């Protein structure tokens, strides 16, 4: 349907004119005078609605089945059912090559769909543009900008674990600070920031000070909660909570300084 619409737009932009050889009448080529175009589009739209209806029905059936499975999950032994499934699968006469091709095809389809989703979301998306810009900004401040892919859909990456050590933690920090910035722009107020053991994440003193400097310069109005065994000179705490012995004890465990 989209391809037809784009094609008609393209034809109209060409300003084509057809001539009747018998009468000499010249007629500009427009969408309105192309025979059967509108009927064809209406047919496609109707077919699309039917498919959407079928899709909704299938989704409903899936949810009903999932609910039934959940209800009956406590009614049988999981181990015995797994053995039963294994046995049934072993009896299915499907060539391995066929299964392999099917799995490969589905993986390709999934990859194409994910790419299409990213493309749709990325088009003229202010939030995505801001996120990408801020991730690059903080990564550069932490001297890891060279590890950031310049493509805007990089914010959808699930491959950060390919990095390691201080580089990984700095880039994760850049992502989180960018998310917080954009979240605050949307909400209209500041949100608390919690740092759990920043000195225990393969970061040396210089790296830690770089991350804390970003908090001090860009998030000075936020409530910042740091869980650490170290003191940080660049921050003057409004309140300090010291944990003594174990965390789950009586009220005497907590000394507020």
Image: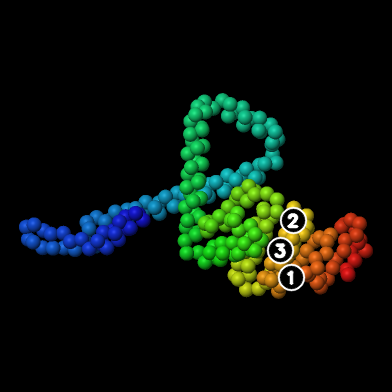
Q: CA distance from mark 1 to mark 3?
A: 19 Å
Q: Residues within 10 Å of mark 1 (few under 14, many from 20)?
A: few
Q: From what the image shows, is residue 158 above or below residue 26? A: above
Nearer to us: label 1 or label 3: 3
Give the residue number, with chain letter if any, for mark 3: 210
Q: Nearer the viewer, residue 147 or 115?
A: 147
Say which residue appears at 60% left-offset and 54% top-offset.
147
Which residue is the site of mark 2?
Answer: 203
Drawn side of residue 46 relative to residue 210, left or right: left
Find numbered disc 3 in the image and state the secondary structure of the residue it sits on: helix
Whole-percent x and y of residue 35?
Answer: 22, 56
Q: Which mark is residue 223?
A: 1
Give the residue furthest to the right.
252
Q: Residue at x 65, y 45 (%)?
A: 70
Q: Earlier in the sequence, mark 1 or mark 3?
A: 3
Spot occupied by residue 37 in the image (x, y as percentages of width and height): 26, 56
Residue 207 visible here:
yes
Disc 1 element: loop
In the rendered view, how is the structure colored? rainbow
Does 49 appear above or below 241?
Answer: above
- Which image quarter holds the C terminus? bottom right
């Amino acid at each position: 349907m989209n391809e037809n619409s784009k094609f008609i737009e393209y034809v109209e932009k060409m300003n084509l004119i057809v001539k009747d050889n018998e009468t000499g009448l010249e007629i500009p080529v427009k969408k309105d005078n192309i025979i059967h175009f509108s009927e064809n589009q209406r047919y496609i739209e109707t077919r699309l609605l039917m498919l959407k209806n079928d899709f909704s029905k299938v989704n409903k059936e899936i949810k009903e089945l999932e609910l039934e499975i959940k209800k009956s999950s406590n009614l049988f032994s999981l181990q015995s059912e797994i053995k039963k499934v294994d046995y049934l699968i072993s009896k299915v006469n499907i060539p391995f090559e066929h299964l392999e091709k099917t799995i490969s095809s589905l993986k390709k389809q999934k990859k194409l769909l994910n790419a299409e989703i990213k493309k749709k979301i990325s088009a003229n998306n202010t939030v995505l543009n801001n996120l990408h810009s801020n991730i690059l900004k903080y990564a550069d401040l932490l001297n890891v900008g060279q590890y950031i892919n310049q493509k805007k859909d990089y914010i959808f990456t699930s491959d950060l674990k390919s990095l390691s050590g201080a580089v990984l933690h700095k880039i994760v920090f850049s992502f989180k600070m960018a998310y917080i910035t954009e979240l605050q722009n949307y909400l209209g107020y500041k949100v608390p920031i919690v740092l759990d053991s920043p000195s225990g994440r393969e970061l040396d003193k210089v790296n830690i000070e770089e991350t804390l400097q970003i908090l001090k310069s860009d998030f000075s109005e936020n409530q910042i909660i740091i869980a650490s065994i170290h003191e940080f000179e660049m921050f003057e705490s409004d309140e300090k909570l010291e944990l003594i012995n174990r965390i789950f004890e009586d009220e005497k465990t907590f000394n507020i300084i």
